[in-house]
Amino acid sequence: MGGNRPRIAWLVLAGTLAGALLLAGCGDSAGEGGNPALADEDSATQTPGNDSENQSEGGSGGATETDGGEAVPETGIAPFEPHWGKVGVFTEATTCQRCHRASPEGATPAVMRYPDADGADVSPAGGWGGSMMDQAFHDPYYQAVVAEEAERFPHYAGDIEDKCLTCHAPMARTHAHQTGTGLSGENCQLNPDGCFRMETAWGQEHAREGVSCTVCHQIQDDGSLGTKEGYSGKYSISADPSTPEIFGPFENPRGTGMANISGYTPVHAPHMDRSETCATCHNLYTPTFDLEGNPTGDEFLEQGPHLEWKNSRFAGERSCQDCHMPQPEDGYATRIAVRQSGEPQPALPERTPFHRHALLGGNAYMLDVMEEFREELGLRPGVEEQLEEKAEQTRAFLGNQAAELRIPRLERSGAELLADVEIHNLTGHKLPTSFPSRRMWLHLTVTDAEGEVVFESGAVDEKGRLLMGSDPLRENCLAVEKPEGFTNAGCYEPHRNEIRSEEEVAVYEAVLGDVNGHVTHVLLHADTYLKDNRIPPEGFTESGAGFVPDTAVAGAAREDGDFNRNADGPGSGRDTVHYRIPLAEAQGSLTVRAELRYQTIRPSFVEGLHAEDEKVGRFKAMYGAMPPAVEQLAVMERSLP
């Protein structure tokens, strides 16, 4: 990645979009390889009048294909300029980074470096840069999804964009509503004061900076944190720029220097260390619309990591910050600022516990995409190294802290091999969690003494598509309006307690259903979960004090005696899959390898984008050029003589 990898070819298209964007749709050809009878995402959406199973719908087309067979549009987005100054109560991140950065290598005393003077940069400036928080606005999948929903519900397009920008461009959206400037009443029915629109956000650098320092550190503890009244982006930030305060977790803050340099007065605020602050954006309820585009009055929990955490044993043991902003080590102490020159300021006290602003999550793939297409997405110059480093950190985080596997049973029984695989969720929320495009599955292979594969469940092709009996990319499964007589059969892999063939795969995912109970990929059509067998965290029970019915397990997993249950009852945070594998002619020793795999964006969520907006076409092109990465969360191998 970065400068060591050849750039994907880009092709120039005619035309511009309001002087800011040049975007186009493309076709996506299904790749060769794999067993065509095992069809997850092996067949794509058919466009009207096209009989080819390997053509998918894009946006407005016309781009020429690259050497790799993928048509990728070129854009004309101006690079983000990080030195935009101050707008209302918000200030550019570079102001904070003048002091909240690590001291130079070798400086004494070492400030925000670990484990010693020559150690890693663990400063807020070094952690935030290149994170998904940093790039919350520029994320091309986010941009495509917003465009899709706005085109699907045109009368509410302003409301949709305003709501999404609340957490993806919080400085600009908050400032617009605080001052009443830059708001539009067009297609804005739910916001009486007007809506902050995506087109406006593209022209504001404080929108493009994403989730920055002076957002999180100005969220007030107004009594709504951690309650439904504070979820879905309902944070409170003071609108008075004359006396701005910055909240931090440490007592007795030294305020003179910060006030002189930035204009903010630091204030001790215990809520900065609590999960409730994260809940403002990481619990999201959305309204439900029927198939005619009308709101039903119901709401749907699109994602709820914080609610899942509240109903786990971790709620009394550790916060969101403990895992996603980890300390370099227990007891690590450091000064939290340097002089503007970068030299240490010995007069400052050392602080502990010190949480790195690593902001680690589960989206290494999108960091890869943004690094590859950084110029076309208009990212700031020099961000590629930060994106690459953050992707590496994210993969290490996923591989070390997400899950563990066991194979507690492995034996022959007549002509069958019996293998039990147990998954243990190590996180404080469902695995996987957050946006419903994410999925996890077991890839299990059995090899004989010569190393030949005699059984494989959970393989993927070169496009990142699972090979299995169900076909989520079947045209009717992806259609917004289903034909008469439609059933969900075959549109997603059912929950598996027992697996007997290679076509069956243990897939852990959330499957959305509309008001008719049909599978949907339109977020605002979501009314229920047809399937939600994402593995809950330890301690998650439906009788717990923290249980919210919206987070309940859905589908066949509810009847699985191994799912989140053990001999002591519910709340194990585990699932066991029982493999009953026909041995056929296999003789001699056998080796079973189980891998727990994960994808951020499963292919059906991309093929389920139907809008003709250029941002949809742009992301489909990027996704086709860089198929979804398959991450490995855990692995276990065991042999049978």
Image (spheres, rainbow, N blue to C red):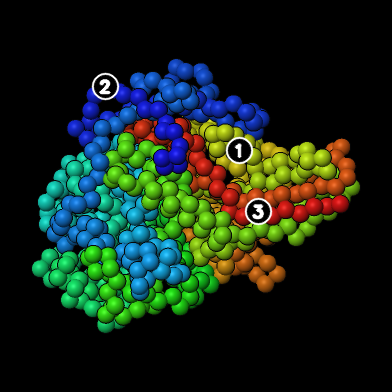
Q: Earlier along the polypeptide chain: callout 2 or callout 3? A: 2
Residue at x 44%, y 75% (from the top left corner): 332
Above or below, comparing residue 371 to residue 174 in the picture:
above
Query: Which is more foreground, mark 1 or mark 3?
Result: 3
Residue 430 lies left or right of residue 15; in this view the side is right
Along the line of sight, the residue nearer the viewer: 639 or 327: 327
Packing grade of label 3 (10 A; few <14, some 14-19, many >=20) is some
Task: Check disc 3 and report the residue beneath it.
Answer: 635
Q: Earlier along the polypeptide chain: callout 1 or callout 3? A: 1
Along the line of sight, the residue nearer the viewer: 376 or 218: 376
Q: CA distance from mark 1 to mark 2?
A: 37 Å
Q: Residue 263's quadrant in the figure? A: bottom left
Task: Check disc 1 and report the residue beneath it.
Answer: 460
Report the amino acid beneath label 2: Ala
Residue 570 lies left or right of residue 277; in this view the side is right
Q: Secondary structure at mark 1?
A: loop
Q: CA distance from mark 2 to mark 3?
A: 48 Å
Residue at x 75%, y 49% (from the top left corner): 592
